[in-house]
Amino acid sequence: MQIFQQQDHSTASHQNLNNKTFRIIHPFHPYRDIEFDIDSVRRIASGCRIFFYNTKGRRSSVPLQWTDIGLKDPFVVVSAGRSLFRVEDLLGLVRLIEEIYSASRK
C-alpha cells in the first residue's frame, strides 16, 4: 500500500490515503485494535507518523508501522507471531539497561 502520492511531499492529507480510518496493531499499545479516523500522515526525521484524535479528543500520533495501514515489518511477518520482539529492539533494550546500570554505579 502506498501512503503518499509523491515521495517528495512531507505531509499527506486524507485525499492521498487509501483508507480514512486505521487501527493500531502494536501488541503493547493501549489503543490496540481501536479504529481511529486519520487526521494526517507526516514524514519526519524518525520516519512516518500517523496523526489522529485519541479517545480523549487529544491529537496523538504513532509510527505508521504500528498501524494496519503501514508496511508490515518483515521480521513480524516471518515470525508469524512466534516472537513479539525484533533482534534490533532487544539489542536496544540491552544497551539501555547497560546505560542505566552504569549510571547507577557512578
Image (cartoon, helix red, strand yellow):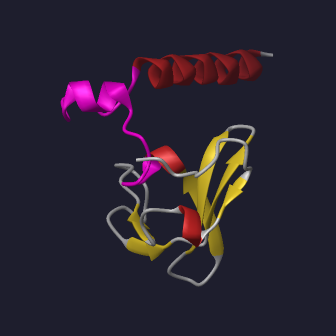
Q: Which of the 4 quarters of the picture holds residue 22?
A: bottom left
Q: Which of the 4 quarters of the picture holds residue 75?
A: top left
Q: Which residues are magenta?
A: 66-86
Res. 83 visible in picture: no
- In this figure, what is the number of numbered marks? 0
**Residue 102 falls within the magenta-colored stretch:** no
Query: Position of 3 compared to 73: left or right?
Result: right
Outermost residue on the front side: it is 6
Q: Which of the 4 quarters of the picture holds residue 96?
A: top right
Q: Nearer the viewer, residue 99 or 62?
A: 62
Q: Nearer the viewer, residue 38 or 103?
A: 38
Query: Position of 89 compared to 96: left or right?
Result: left
Main secondary structure along the magenta-highlighted residues: loop
Give residue 62's position: percent from left, percent from top.
Answer: 56, 55
Give residue 52's position: percent from left, percent from top.
Answer: 57, 71
Q: Residue at x 53, y 24 (%)?
A: 93
Residue 87 against residue 6 in the figure, above or below: above
Residue 33 against residue 72 in the figure, above or below: below
Give residue 80's position: percent from left, percent from top.
Answer: 19, 32
Residue 22 against residue 43 in the figure, above or below: below
Q: Nearer the viewer, residue 51 or 31?
A: 51
Q: Residue at x 45, y 22 (%)?
A: 90
Q: Residue at x 65, y 41 (%)?
A: 7
Outermost residue on the bottom side: it is 57
Residue 91 against residue 13 in the figure, above or below: above
Q: Residue at x 65, y 19 (%)?
A: 101
Q: Nearer the viewer, residue 105 or 70?
A: 70
Query: Position of 92 compared to 21: left or right?
Result: right
Res. 47 visible in picture: yes
Quarter of the image where the C terminus is located = top right
